Amino acid sequence: MPSPQFPPLPALTRAEGEFIDRYLEVLDQVGRINPARGNDTYSALRAAQALASHAAALRDALTLMHERGETRIHASTLARALRTLDGERRAGRVTVPPPAG
């Protein structure tokens, strides 16, 4: 059985790639904390604890971009990268789900 073909990531600088990776980590942690989707306080607590370090890493990635002179965020390119990396599903965990039935 052939492996599935994933769309290629758009060309990103190393700093942009780091920015996207760190952003998705923060998004994942916020999704785990979401009280409308959680199951227990312990997992939300662990995610909240991890959020602080992931947010610091995101800040550092953005600082690096700025220091390297990458002062513009190319939203359309980064949005394509987020879609390729399943960002829409991951972002969906942050929202409040629709009412049941």
Image (cartoon, grey):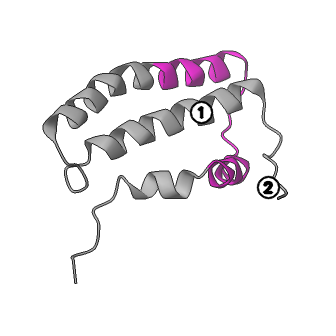
View extreme (front): residue:
1
Answer with mark 2 or mark 1, whichever residue precedes in sequence. Answer: 2
Give the quadrant of residue 48.
top left
The amino acid type found where label 1 is placed reads Asp
Q: Secondary structure at mark 2?
A: loop
Residue at the spot 35% in from the left edge and 46% down from the top edge: 31
Q: Position of residue 79 (x, y in %)?
A: 65, 52
**Looking at this view, is 91 or 47 the one in front?**
47
Residue at the spot 59% in from the left edge and 33% down from the top edge: 21
Please indicate whether residue 11 sits to the left or right of residue 35 in the image. right
Q: Which residue is mark 2?
A: 7
Residue at the spot 22% in from the left edge and 84% down from the top edge: 101
Vertical relation: 41 (above or below) 53:
below
Residue at the spot 43% in from the left edge and 19% down from the top edge: 56
Q: Is residue 67 magenta?
A: yes
Vertical relation: 31 (above or below) 23:
below
Vertical relation: 69 (above or below) 38:
above
The span shown in magenta is 57-85
The amino acid type found where label 2 is placed reads Pro
Q: Position of residue 13 (x, y in %)?
A: 78, 30
Q: Main secondary structure of the magenta part?
A: helix
Q: Which mark is residue 21?
A: 1
Q: Is residue 28 magenta?
A: no
